[in-house]
Amino acid sequence: MNEEWLKTSKIDSKKFICGYCGNSISSNIGYYMSNSYHNYSTPSGAGYIYICHHCNKPTYFDFHSQTPSPMYGKNFNEKIFDDQKTWLLYQEIRKCIEASAYTSAIMASRKLLMHIAVDCGAEKNKSFQFYVDFLNNQNYIPKNSKEWVDIIRTKGNDANHDIIIYEETDAKQMLQFVEMIITIIYEMKYKLETYMHS
């Protein structure tokens, strides 16, 4: 059976999150796989490549999967961060989770929380526990999320000092905590400043 990719702008529209730029899109522009059973004139259903109209990059779909899949976690606007390193490290954590590098994701989350604490006025060259306590004591962590502090402290220290391999759930929980901190410290501040100057 011969197969080939055919260009078309009339494939069925598909809504998905682009694995490159993170935008939610609906596209009908791309390619489909056809074969001799379909006389090269209609899609076989075996594969589709959709083109993102934001970044113009291709995403492949078969019966069961999307490649590249969207990164786990919130797609924060780069503009909310005062220091681009914060945004880059957050993206690195998301990429680690996408690559199933869960222990690396937790260690990078640990580093990011330390960076955020210093950005908020904490002293440099202190321990991870010092920085988590700083964020907690300075009320960057909401009251109903205080129990997370001990979980983050434990996971962060274990990942850095003990021979432990973490799983997907652990990494995603850590990222959710990081997202909450970023939302409170950076995103809400940016939205307020944007609103005040509009």
Image (tube, rainbow, N blue to C red):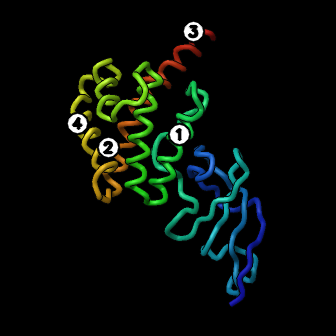
Gap in angstroms between the C-alphas marked 1 and 3: 23 Å
Hey, what amino acid is under mark 1? Asn
Q: From mark 2 to mark 3, how far is it between C-alphas?
A: 37 Å
Disc nearest the viewer among 3 and 4? 4
Residues at discs 3 and 4 in contact (Cβ within 8 Å): no
* Whole-percent x, y for residue 145 in the image: 26, 30
Q: Mark 3 points at which residue?
A: 196
Q: In this view, does 37 lie to the left or right of 171?
A: right
How busy is the neighbourhood of tag 3: few (under 14 within 10 Å), some, or many (20 plus)?
A: few
Which numbered disc flags the more N-terminal residue, 1 or 4? 1
Q: What residue type is labelled 2?
A: Gly
Q: Residue furthest front?
A: 125
Q: Tag 1: Cα neighbours inside 10 Å, few (<14), some, or many (≥20)?
A: some
Residue 83, compared with residue 23, is above or below; it is above
Residue toward you, 195 or 157 = 157
Which disc is residue 156 wearing? 2
* Residue at point 43%, 26% (across, down): 124
Find residue 89 and report its horizontal and vertical position in percent: 52, 41
* Element type at mark 2: helix
- Which three-letter amino acid code belongs to the residue tagged 3? Met
- Placement of the C terminus among the 4 image quadrants: top right
In this rendering, the label closer to the viewer, 1 or 2: 2
Q: Earlier in the sequence, mark 1 or mark 2?
A: 1
Looking at this view, is 34 or 141 the one in front?
Answer: 141
| Residue picked out by circle 4 | 150
